[in-house]
Amino acid sequence: MSEAALFHDPNYPVPGHGKVWFAETRDRARLRFARWRPTVRPARGTIVLAEGRAEFIERYSETIAELRRRGFHVLTFDWRGQGGSQRFVRRERKGHVGRLSHYEADLALVMAEMQAKFPPPYFMLAHSMGAAICLDAARHGALPISRLVAIAPMLELTIIERPQAASRLASTLYWLGLGRLFVPGGGDTAIATKPFEGNRLTSDPVRYARNSALSAAARNLSIGDPTIGWVRNAFKLMRRLGAPSAALEVKVPTLIIAAGRDPVVSTPAIERFAARLKTGSALVLPTARHEILMENDAIRAQFWAAFDAFIPGEDQSSASSTSEQAEGGLMQRLAAGRDDPAAAGGAAAIP
Protein backbone atom coordinates (compact mmCIF):
# COMPACT_ATOMS: atom_id res chain seq x y z
CA MET A 1 0.00 0.00 0.00
CA SER A 2 1.35 3.43 -0.90
CA GLU A 3 0.24 7.01 -0.45
CA ALA A 4 -0.94 9.26 -3.27
CA ALA A 5 -2.55 12.62 -3.70
CA LEU A 6 -5.89 13.74 -5.02
CA PHE A 7 -5.99 16.13 -7.95
CA HIS A 8 -6.78 19.61 -6.68
CA ASP A 9 -8.54 21.94 -9.08
CA PRO A 10 -8.67 25.49 -7.64
CA ASN A 11 -12.11 25.97 -9.23
CA TYR A 12 -13.49 22.71 -7.76
CA PRO A 13 -11.41 21.71 -4.73
CA VAL A 14 -11.82 18.30 -3.16
CA PRO A 15 -12.82 18.26 0.52
CA GLY A 16 -9.93 18.62 2.91
CA HIS A 17 -8.53 16.01 5.30
CA GLY A 18 -9.01 13.15 2.86
CA LYS A 19 -6.70 10.16 2.83
CA VAL A 20 -5.73 8.38 -0.39
CA TRP A 21 -4.15 4.94 -0.76
CA PHE A 22 -3.77 2.02 -3.15
CA ALA A 23 -4.63 -1.62 -2.60
CA GLU A 24 -4.52 -4.72 -4.80
CA THR A 25 -7.33 -7.03 -5.80
CA ARG A 26 -7.03 -10.80 -5.67
CA ASP A 27 -5.90 -10.72 -9.33
CA ARG A 28 -3.34 -7.99 -8.52
CA ALA A 29 -5.06 -4.97 -10.03
CA ARG A 30 -4.04 -1.76 -8.25
CA LEU A 31 -7.04 0.37 -7.22
CA ARG A 32 -7.06 3.93 -5.89
CA PHE A 33 -9.09 4.60 -2.74
CA ALA A 34 -9.98 7.74 -0.80
CA ARG A 35 -11.67 8.30 2.54
CA TRP A 36 -13.08 11.16 4.61
CA ARG A 37 -14.44 11.42 8.13
CA PRO A 38 -17.79 13.09 8.87
CA THR A 39 -17.81 16.77 9.75
CA VAL A 40 -20.56 16.39 12.37
CA ARG A 41 -21.03 14.07 15.34
CA PRO A 42 -22.18 11.53 16.19
CA ALA A 43 -21.16 9.56 13.12
CA ARG A 44 -24.05 7.77 11.41
CA GLY A 45 -22.12 5.02 9.66
CA THR A 46 -20.24 4.65 6.39
CA ILE A 47 -21.24 5.43 2.82
CA VAL A 48 -19.40 3.67 0.00
CA LEU A 49 -19.58 5.75 -3.17
CA ALA A 50 -19.30 3.76 -6.42
CA GLU A 51 -18.87 5.76 -9.61
CA GLY A 52 -20.00 5.04 -13.15
CA ARG A 53 -18.00 4.40 -16.31
CA ALA A 54 -15.36 7.01 -17.17
CA GLU A 55 -15.65 8.77 -13.81
CA PHE A 56 -13.09 9.35 -11.08
CA ILE A 57 -13.04 10.24 -7.39
CA GLU A 58 -12.56 14.00 -7.75
CA ARG A 59 -15.76 14.43 -9.81
CA TYR A 60 -17.76 13.64 -6.66
CA SER A 61 -16.25 16.31 -4.42
CA GLU A 62 -19.60 18.07 -3.96
CA THR A 63 -21.36 14.82 -3.10
CA ILE A 64 -18.60 13.78 -0.69
CA ALA A 65 -18.94 17.08 1.17
CA GLU A 66 -22.71 16.64 1.41
CA LEU A 67 -22.37 13.10 2.77
CA ARG A 68 -19.85 14.25 5.38
CA ARG A 69 -22.22 16.99 6.52
CA ARG A 70 -24.85 14.29 7.02
CA GLY A 71 -22.57 12.55 9.49
CA PHE A 72 -21.14 9.77 7.33
CA HIS A 73 -17.68 8.41 6.84
CA VAL A 74 -17.11 8.28 3.06
CA LEU A 75 -15.17 5.59 1.24
CA THR A 76 -14.78 5.87 -2.51
CA PHE A 77 -12.56 4.38 -5.20
CA ASP A 78 -11.82 4.20 -8.92
CA TRP A 79 -12.75 1.06 -10.86
CA ARG A 80 -9.85 -0.54 -12.70
CA GLY A 81 -9.27 0.98 -16.11
CA GLN A 82 -10.25 4.52 -15.09
CA GLY A 83 -9.38 7.34 -12.73
CA GLY A 84 -6.19 6.73 -10.77
CA SER A 85 -6.53 2.95 -10.74
CA GLN A 86 -4.46 0.60 -12.87
CA ARG A 87 -5.18 0.42 -16.58
CA PHE A 88 -4.53 -2.60 -18.76
CA VAL A 89 -4.17 -1.11 -22.24
CA ARG A 90 -1.20 0.70 -23.74
CA ARG A 91 -3.38 3.54 -24.96
CA GLU A 92 -4.59 4.55 -21.52
CA ARG A 93 -7.46 6.75 -22.72
CA LYS A 94 -9.39 3.64 -23.71
CA GLY A 95 -12.17 2.64 -21.33
CA HIS A 96 -11.40 -1.06 -21.07
CA VAL A 97 -12.09 -4.06 -18.89
CA GLY A 98 -11.21 -7.60 -19.91
CA ARG A 99 -13.81 -9.62 -18.00
CA LEU A 100 -16.86 -8.91 -15.90
CA SER A 101 -15.20 -10.89 -13.11
CA HIS A 102 -12.58 -8.14 -12.93
CA TYR A 103 -15.18 -5.64 -11.72
CA GLU A 104 -16.40 -8.28 -9.26
CA ALA A 105 -12.85 -8.55 -7.90
CA ASP A 106 -12.72 -4.76 -7.57
CA LEU A 107 -15.94 -4.72 -5.56
CA ALA A 108 -14.76 -7.58 -3.35
CA LEU A 109 -11.66 -5.56 -2.44
CA VAL A 110 -13.78 -2.48 -1.71
CA MET A 111 -15.99 -4.48 0.65
CA ALA A 112 -12.92 -5.90 2.40
CA GLU A 113 -11.46 -2.39 2.85
CA MET A 114 -14.81 -1.16 4.14
CA GLN A 115 -15.17 -3.87 6.76
CA ALA A 116 -11.53 -3.62 7.88
CA LYS A 117 -11.27 0.15 8.23
CA PHE A 118 -14.70 1.75 8.62
CA PRO A 119 -17.45 1.74 11.26
CA PRO A 120 -20.87 0.20 10.58
CA PRO A 121 -23.64 0.45 9.60
CA TYR A 122 -22.65 0.32 5.94
CA PHE A 123 -24.55 1.88 3.04
CA MET A 124 -23.80 2.23 -0.65
CA LEU A 125 -24.46 5.03 -3.12
CA ALA A 126 -23.77 3.85 -6.66
CA HIS A 127 -24.25 5.34 -10.12
CA SER A 128 -24.90 3.84 -13.56
CA MET A 129 -22.34 1.09 -14.27
CA GLY A 130 -21.38 1.03 -10.60
CA ALA A 131 -25.04 0.68 -9.61
CA ALA A 132 -25.51 -2.27 -11.98
CA ILE A 133 -22.41 -4.02 -10.60
CA CYS A 134 -23.70 -3.51 -7.06
CA LEU A 135 -27.20 -4.79 -7.88
CA ASP A 136 -25.67 -7.93 -9.37
CA ALA A 137 -23.47 -8.42 -6.29
CA ALA A 138 -26.52 -7.97 -4.05
CA ARG A 139 -28.07 -11.04 -5.68
CA HIS A 140 -25.29 -13.27 -4.41
CA GLY A 141 -24.63 -12.02 -0.89
CA ALA A 142 -21.50 -10.21 -2.09
CA LEU A 143 -22.65 -6.79 -0.85
CA PRO A 144 -22.44 -6.84 2.99
CA ILE A 145 -24.25 -3.53 3.50
CA SER A 146 -27.52 -2.45 5.10
CA ARG A 147 -28.97 -0.43 2.23
CA LEU A 148 -28.22 0.48 -1.37
CA VAL A 149 -29.14 3.64 -3.28
CA ALA A 150 -28.73 2.93 -7.00
CA ILE A 151 -28.79 5.98 -9.30
CA ALA A 152 -29.75 5.40 -12.96
CA PRO A 153 -28.43 1.81 -12.95
CA MET A 154 -27.16 0.46 -16.25
CA LEU A 155 -29.85 -2.16 -16.89
CA GLU A 156 -30.38 -1.33 -20.58
CA LEU A 157 -28.45 1.09 -22.78
CA THR A 158 -30.57 3.42 -24.87
CA ILE A 159 -27.45 5.16 -26.12
CA ILE A 160 -26.75 2.19 -28.40
CA GLU A 161 -29.01 1.67 -31.40
CA ARG A 162 -30.03 -1.94 -32.15
CA PRO A 163 -28.59 -3.32 -28.89
CA GLN A 164 -29.04 -6.99 -29.80
CA ALA A 165 -27.05 -6.56 -32.99
CA ALA A 166 -24.44 -4.52 -31.11
CA SER A 167 -24.11 -7.23 -28.48
CA ARG A 168 -23.59 -9.95 -31.11
CA LEU A 169 -21.05 -7.81 -32.96
CA ALA A 170 -19.12 -7.04 -29.79
CA SER A 171 -18.92 -10.73 -28.91
CA THR A 172 -17.78 -11.66 -32.40
CA LEU A 173 -15.09 -8.98 -32.49
CA TYR A 174 -13.97 -9.93 -28.98
CA TRP A 175 -13.45 -13.56 -29.94
CA LEU A 176 -11.53 -12.41 -33.00
CA GLY A 177 -9.05 -10.82 -30.62
CA LEU A 178 -10.20 -7.23 -31.09
CA GLY A 179 -11.54 -6.61 -27.59
CA ARG A 180 -8.98 -3.91 -26.81
CA LEU A 181 -9.94 -1.72 -29.75
CA PHE A 182 -12.17 1.32 -29.35
CA VAL A 183 -15.78 0.80 -30.35
CA PRO A 184 -16.30 1.83 -34.00
CA GLY A 185 -16.00 5.61 -34.18
CA GLY A 186 -14.63 5.83 -30.65
CA GLY A 187 -11.71 7.94 -29.55
CA ASP A 188 -9.79 9.55 -26.72
CA THR A 189 -12.13 12.47 -26.03
CA ALA A 190 -13.77 12.24 -22.60
CA ILE A 191 -17.54 12.54 -22.77
CA ALA A 192 -17.51 15.19 -20.02
CA THR A 193 -15.40 17.53 -22.19
CA LYS A 194 -17.77 17.57 -25.15
CA PRO A 195 -20.04 20.63 -25.72
CA PHE A 196 -22.82 21.29 -23.22
CA GLU A 197 -25.49 21.66 -25.89
CA GLY A 198 -27.01 18.26 -26.56
CA ASN A 199 -25.13 16.58 -23.74
CA ARG A 200 -26.68 13.46 -22.18
CA LEU A 201 -25.52 14.01 -18.62
CA THR A 202 -27.06 17.07 -16.99
CA SER A 203 -29.23 20.13 -17.58
CA ASP A 204 -27.03 22.24 -15.30
CA PRO A 205 -24.56 24.30 -17.38
CA VAL A 206 -22.51 25.38 -14.37
CA ARG A 207 -21.88 21.89 -13.02
CA TYR A 208 -21.28 20.60 -16.54
CA ALA A 209 -18.66 23.31 -17.19
CA ARG A 210 -17.04 22.55 -13.84
CA ASN A 211 -16.78 18.83 -14.57
CA SER A 212 -15.61 19.49 -18.13
CA ALA A 213 -12.80 21.72 -16.89
CA LEU A 214 -11.85 19.13 -14.28
CA SER A 215 -11.69 16.32 -16.84
CA ALA A 216 -9.58 18.47 -19.15
CA ALA A 217 -7.19 19.49 -16.37
CA ALA A 218 -6.93 16.00 -14.85
CA ARG A 219 -6.33 14.35 -18.19
CA ASN A 220 -4.46 11.46 -16.57
CA LEU A 221 -7.62 10.55 -14.63
CA SER A 222 -10.20 10.79 -17.41
CA ILE A 223 -10.76 8.33 -20.24
CA GLY A 224 -12.43 8.39 -23.63
CA ASP A 225 -14.85 5.98 -25.27
CA PRO A 226 -15.14 2.31 -24.31
CA THR A 227 -13.49 -0.63 -25.98
CA ILE A 228 -15.25 -3.53 -27.64
CA GLY A 229 -14.33 -5.61 -24.59
CA TRP A 230 -16.03 -3.17 -22.24
CA VAL A 231 -19.19 -3.20 -24.37
CA ARG A 232 -19.23 -7.00 -24.44
CA ASN A 233 -18.99 -7.14 -20.65
CA ALA A 234 -21.63 -4.44 -20.23
CA PHE A 235 -24.09 -6.48 -22.27
CA LYS A 236 -23.20 -9.58 -20.25
CA LEU A 237 -23.98 -7.72 -17.02
CA MET A 238 -27.24 -6.32 -18.41
CA ARG A 239 -28.36 -9.79 -19.54
CA ARG A 240 -27.82 -11.08 -16.00
CA LEU A 241 -29.89 -8.29 -14.51
CA GLY A 242 -32.52 -8.62 -17.22
CA ALA A 243 -33.36 -12.20 -16.25
CA PRO A 244 -36.88 -12.47 -14.73
CA SER A 245 -35.48 -13.80 -11.45
CA ALA A 246 -32.70 -11.22 -11.05
CA ALA A 247 -34.59 -8.53 -9.14
CA LEU A 248 -36.21 -11.15 -6.91
CA GLU A 249 -32.74 -12.31 -5.87
CA VAL A 250 -31.53 -8.89 -4.65
CA LYS A 251 -31.00 -9.37 -0.92
CA VAL A 252 -30.25 -5.78 0.09
CA PRO A 253 -32.99 -3.18 0.70
CA THR A 254 -32.66 -0.90 -2.31
CA LEU A 255 -33.87 2.48 -3.47
CA ILE A 256 -33.44 3.05 -7.20
CA ILE A 257 -33.56 6.65 -8.38
CA ALA A 258 -34.02 7.07 -12.13
CA ALA A 259 -33.93 10.03 -14.50
CA GLY A 260 -37.04 10.75 -16.54
CA ARG A 261 -35.02 12.27 -19.40
CA ASP A 262 -32.15 9.80 -19.38
CA PRO A 263 -30.72 9.28 -22.89
CA VAL A 264 -28.04 6.85 -21.67
CA VAL A 265 -29.89 4.09 -19.80
CA SER A 266 -33.51 2.95 -20.08
CA THR A 267 -35.78 4.32 -17.37
CA PRO A 268 -38.64 1.92 -18.34
CA ALA A 269 -36.23 -1.00 -17.85
CA ILE A 270 -35.34 0.37 -14.42
CA GLU A 271 -39.03 0.63 -13.48
CA ARG A 272 -39.67 -2.96 -14.61
CA PHE A 273 -36.73 -4.18 -12.54
CA ALA A 274 -37.86 -2.23 -9.47
CA ALA A 275 -41.38 -3.63 -9.74
CA ARG A 276 -39.94 -7.11 -9.09
CA LEU A 277 -37.77 -6.17 -6.10
CA LYS A 278 -38.81 -7.84 -2.85
CA THR A 279 -37.25 -5.15 -0.64
CA GLY A 280 -37.00 -2.09 -2.80
CA SER A 281 -38.66 0.64 -4.80
CA ALA A 282 -37.91 3.21 -7.47
CA LEU A 283 -38.43 6.93 -7.80
CA VAL A 284 -38.29 8.74 -11.13
CA LEU A 285 -37.15 12.37 -11.26
CA PRO A 286 -38.99 13.44 -14.43
CA THR A 287 -36.74 16.30 -15.59
CA ALA A 288 -33.38 14.78 -14.69
CA ARG A 289 -30.78 13.52 -17.13
CA HIS A 290 -28.37 10.68 -16.51
CA GLU A 291 -26.04 12.20 -13.90
CA ILE A 292 -28.56 13.07 -11.18
CA LEU A 293 -25.88 14.06 -8.67
CA MET A 294 -24.55 16.59 -11.20
CA GLU A 295 -27.98 18.05 -11.95
CA ASN A 296 -29.46 21.45 -11.06
CA ASP A 297 -30.25 22.37 -7.47
CA ALA A 298 -33.98 21.62 -7.70
CA ILE A 299 -33.42 18.08 -8.98
CA ARG A 300 -30.64 17.42 -6.50
CA ALA A 301 -32.89 18.58 -3.64
CA GLN A 302 -35.41 15.91 -4.67
CA PHE A 303 -32.64 13.32 -4.72
CA TRP A 304 -31.38 14.23 -1.26
CA ALA A 305 -34.91 14.19 0.18
CA ALA A 306 -35.27 10.60 -1.01
CA PHE A 307 -31.80 9.66 0.17
CA ASP A 308 -32.32 11.14 3.64
CA ALA A 309 -35.60 9.28 4.10
CA PHE A 310 -34.14 5.96 2.98
CA ILE A 311 -30.76 5.96 4.73
CA PRO A 312 -31.49 6.12 8.47
CA GLY A 313 -27.98 5.35 9.69
CA GLU A 314 -29.18 3.76 12.93
CA ASP A 315 -27.64 0.77 14.62
CA GLN A 316 -29.10 -2.37 13.11
CA SER A 317 -30.69 -3.42 16.40
CA SER A 318 -33.21 -0.61 16.00
CA ALA A 319 -33.12 -0.12 12.24
CA SER A 320 -36.05 -2.32 11.26
CA SER A 321 -38.94 -0.27 12.62
CA THR A 322 -37.20 3.00 11.78
CA SER A 323 -36.65 1.83 8.20
CA GLU A 324 -40.32 1.03 7.72
CA GLN A 325 -41.34 4.43 9.06
CA ALA A 326 -38.79 6.21 6.87
CA GLU A 327 -39.91 4.43 3.72
CA GLY A 328 -43.55 5.10 4.43
CA GLY A 329 -42.86 8.79 4.98
CA LEU A 330 -40.72 8.90 1.86
CA MET A 331 -43.47 7.61 -0.38
CA GLN A 332 -46.08 9.83 1.20
CA ARG A 333 -43.96 12.93 0.62
CA LEU A 334 -42.53 12.18 -2.80
CA ALA A 335 -45.65 10.69 -4.33
CA ALA A 336 -47.91 13.38 -2.91
CA GLY A 337 -50.77 14.26 -5.17
CA ARG A 338 -50.84 10.88 -6.96
CA ASP A 339 -53.80 8.52 -6.84
CA ASP A 340 -51.43 5.54 -6.59
CA PRO A 341 -48.71 6.20 -4.02
CA ALA A 342 -45.83 3.83 -4.61
CA ALA A 343 -45.37 0.87 -2.35
CA ALA A 344 -42.26 -1.26 -2.02
CA GLY A 345 -41.51 -2.84 -5.35
CA GLY A 346 -43.07 -0.06 -7.41
CA ALA A 347 -42.06 3.23 -8.94
CA ALA A 348 -43.17 6.74 -8.14
CA ALA A 349 -42.67 9.88 -10.18
CA ILE A 350 -42.04 13.11 -8.35
CA PRO A 351 -44.43 15.74 -9.64
Image (cartoon, rainbow, N blue to C red):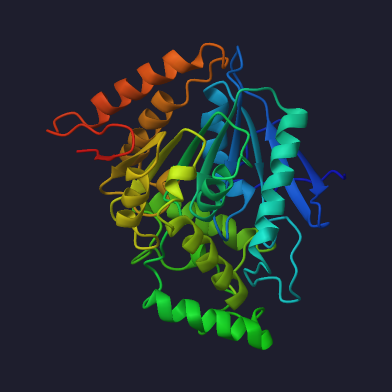
Q: Quadrant of residue 160?
A: bottom left
Q: Quadrant of residue 159?
A: bottom left
Please report the residue visible at 25 percent of the width from the left and 25 percent of the height from the top: 333
Q: Is residue 193 above or below residue 276?
A: below
Q: Quadrant of residue 80?
A: bottom right
Does residue 186 appear in this view?
Answer: no
Q: Is residue 6 above or below residue 70?
A: below
Position of 107 compared to 150: left or right?
A: right
Which residue occupies the foreground of this view, 137 or 51? 137
Quadrant the N terminus occupies: top right
Residue 256 place in picture, x, y as percent? 40, 42
Q: Residue furthest bottom?
A: 176
Which residue occupies the foreground of this view, 263 or 148? 148
Q: Residue furthest front?
A: 245
Please report the residue visible at 26 percent of the width from the left and 49 percent of the height from the top: 287
Please report the residue visible at 61 percent of the width from the left and 40 percent of the height from the top: 141
Q: Is residue 135 above or below residue 162?
A: above
Numbered marks: total? 0
Residue 5 place in picture, x, y as percent? 77, 45
Residue 41 place in picture, x, y as percent? 60, 13
Does residue 272 appear in this view?
Answer: yes
Which residue occupies the foreground of this view, 210 or 261? 261
Quadrant the C terminus occupies: top left
Position of 80 compared to 272: left or right?
A: right
Residue 35 place in picture, x, y as percent? 70, 35
